Amino acid sequence: MVIIEVLRCERCGAPLDVTPEDIIVVCPYCGYPNSYDKIFTEKNVFFVESLPKKEILRLFWERVGQDRDYIGLRGKVEIAKIEGFYVPLWFGKVEGHGYVRFVDYEKEGNKKKRVVRYREFEDNPLVCVPARRGVYDIAVETLAKKFERAGYITFKEIKNTLKYMMEPKPIAELTPSRWESLELEFLNTDFGKEQAKLALLDRASDLAKEKHVPKDTEIKSFGFGGEVEDFALVFYPLWKVYYDIEGGTYFVAYDGHKGKEVLALEPVRVWRKVAYALAALVGVTVAALFMTPYGNLEYWDFVAHARQGALLALIIPALLAYFGFGLARGYGRKMARDVRVER
């Protein structure tokens, strides 16, 4: 006879739906975050205290009162919903190394010589990835990137780095009675330690590309390898305030610990659309103006008889026309949108 063991909630006793990847299993009945495989006793799992809901609301209304985008609309803003979550984030300290081969050009007389260069590098970044693969959330992704790029001091042990960044508390302190005083819901993790190491290495590789691969050049090859020296799982508070205005629903996401704005989806006001339209018109004008010489026979006659300045005469109008085209395309797209993202 096969005996199937059913895991039950430590708080209410309800059965839990557990997969091998789960680290923290949130009870679907009472919301309590249960430990799976006794992870609450481990030293690399933390949670961070959150500001209360009323403080997040105060910050939101303060924003509405100061932001010029809400001029004339402040009385029409209605809060639709406010929700808070403890978002699981994997932090890792990666010892990485790699190389990049790319095409460069060096001047040789009046000509440019094509050269393939090889460059090695070493990195020791702090990386952060959301521990939820199944559901994409732009606010969670933005929060993780803000931790990576804030320039925090990194220590040998990641728990000391976390102390410098926030005020982490061991998840073992989150007893059922302590949990009842929290306002936020805990979100499940989608992958455990081994999968987290792979995700952290992959993210470190992406950061190395951003840092070491030259922009606007031909890349021959890129390689990255490394090891996750230390890592930790942090349940970090994130609040979202959803509000209705002029028939649309938007939101502002807040760092629940520091009260700083993480991301905002806002309506595009008419005055902004007018400004975008004017910028796009300037771009079209610049592009048309500097493309005109290429259809002029006198211009080509000038280039043919020019000596040292021939190359500049060909390149400069093209670059300015490309700039104008980019300006027109970028602001034209913004003009067509009814929502803008502010990070």
Image (spheres, rainbow, N blue to C red):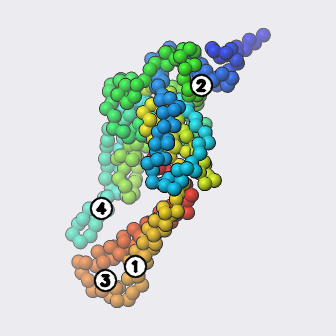
The residue that appears at 32% across and 41% down in the rendered structure is 121
Mark 1: secondary structure: helix
Element class at badge 4: strand
- Sooner in the amino-acid sequence: mark 3 or mark 2: 2
Q: Which residue is mark 1?
A: 289
The residue under the point 33% across, 55% down is 116
The residue mark sitting in front, 2 or 4, is 2
Q: Is residue 135 above or below residue 219?
A: above
Q: CA distance from mark 4 to mark 1?
A: 30 Å
At mark 2, the secondary structure is: loop
Q: For the point 61% across and 21% down, which residue is it?
A: 32
Which residue does the numbered mark 3 point to in the structure image? 303
Within the image, what quadrant is residue 126 found in?
top left
Say which mark, if any, is on residue 298.
none
Secondary structure beneath disc 3?
Answer: helix
**Can residue 312 be spotted in the picture?**
yes
Q: CA distance from mark 3 to mark 4?
A: 23 Å
Rounded to the nearest whole Å, what is the CA distance between mark 3 and mark 2?
68 Å
Q: Which mark is residue 105?
A: 4
The numbered mark, 1 or 2, whose residue comes first in the sequence reads 2
Judge depth for marks 1 and 2 and give the one in front: 1
For badge 4, the amino acid type reads Tyr
CA neighbours of label 1 inside 10 A, class few (<14), some (14 to 19), many (20+): some
Q: Which residue is mark 2?
A: 22
Mark toward the viewer: 3 or 2: 2
- Mark 4 vs mark 1: which is more N-terminal? 4
- Marks 3 and 2: CB-CB under 8 Å? no
| Residue 218 percent across, percent down from the top left | 39, 57
* Amino acid tagged 1: Leu
